[in-house]
Amino acid sequence: QVQLVESGGGLVQAGAPLRLSCAASGRTFGNYAMGWFRQAPGKEREFVAAIRRSGGGTYYADFVKGRFTISRDNAKNTVYLQMNSLKPEDTAVYYCEATMGYSGYGDRRIYDYWGQGTQVTVSS
């Protein structure tokens, strides 16, 4: 079992930055690739970003490329999502998820664990 706890969400104005954190406990964090997903009201949960076990590979949804950066600190069992130039359409609950998989990181079906989410609200 892996327990994931997201933090760092809040209410910000358009254009502002925000950094989300996801702390993991339980099994060895370094054994998992990590992803961030988000879900807006009335919409499906969608892929945002993912990072390989060592941090050597990162992947992004087209709508966040150049604005968001995913990173991880395996010594701290934490994955981060730095979000810059936020837009009102980024408003959603953001979830971090863990997978033992090695590919297909944009597909939620490969993820084994996820947290409770943190709300991000961007005002215009």
Image (cartoon, helix red, strand yellow):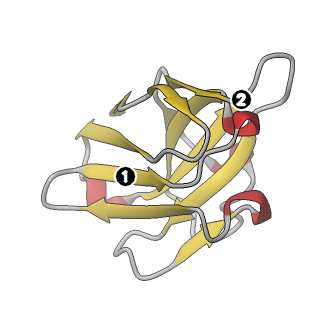
Residue for point 55% across, 61% down: 50
Q: Position of residue 90 (x, y in %)?
A: 68, 39
The disc label shown at residue 80, or none: 1
Question: Are there few (<14), some (14-19), or many (20+) residues within 10 Å of tag 1?
Answer: many
Relative depth, front residue between 10 and 51 = 10
Q: Quadrant of the C terminus?
A: top right
Q: Position of residue 99 (x, y in %)?
A: 52, 52
Rendered position, 46 above or below 94? below
SS under mark 1:
strand
Figure check: 51 above or below 120: below
- Three-letter amino acid code at the position of disc 2: Gln
Residue 82 against residue 21 in the figure, above or below: below
Q: Are marks 1 and 2 in contact (CB under 8 Å)?
A: no
Residue lying at 39% horizontally and 69% vertically, measured from the top left: 53
According to the picture, the residue beneath numbered tag 2 turns out to be: 39
Picture coordinates of residue 81, whole percent (x, y) = 44, 52
Residue 72 tag number: none
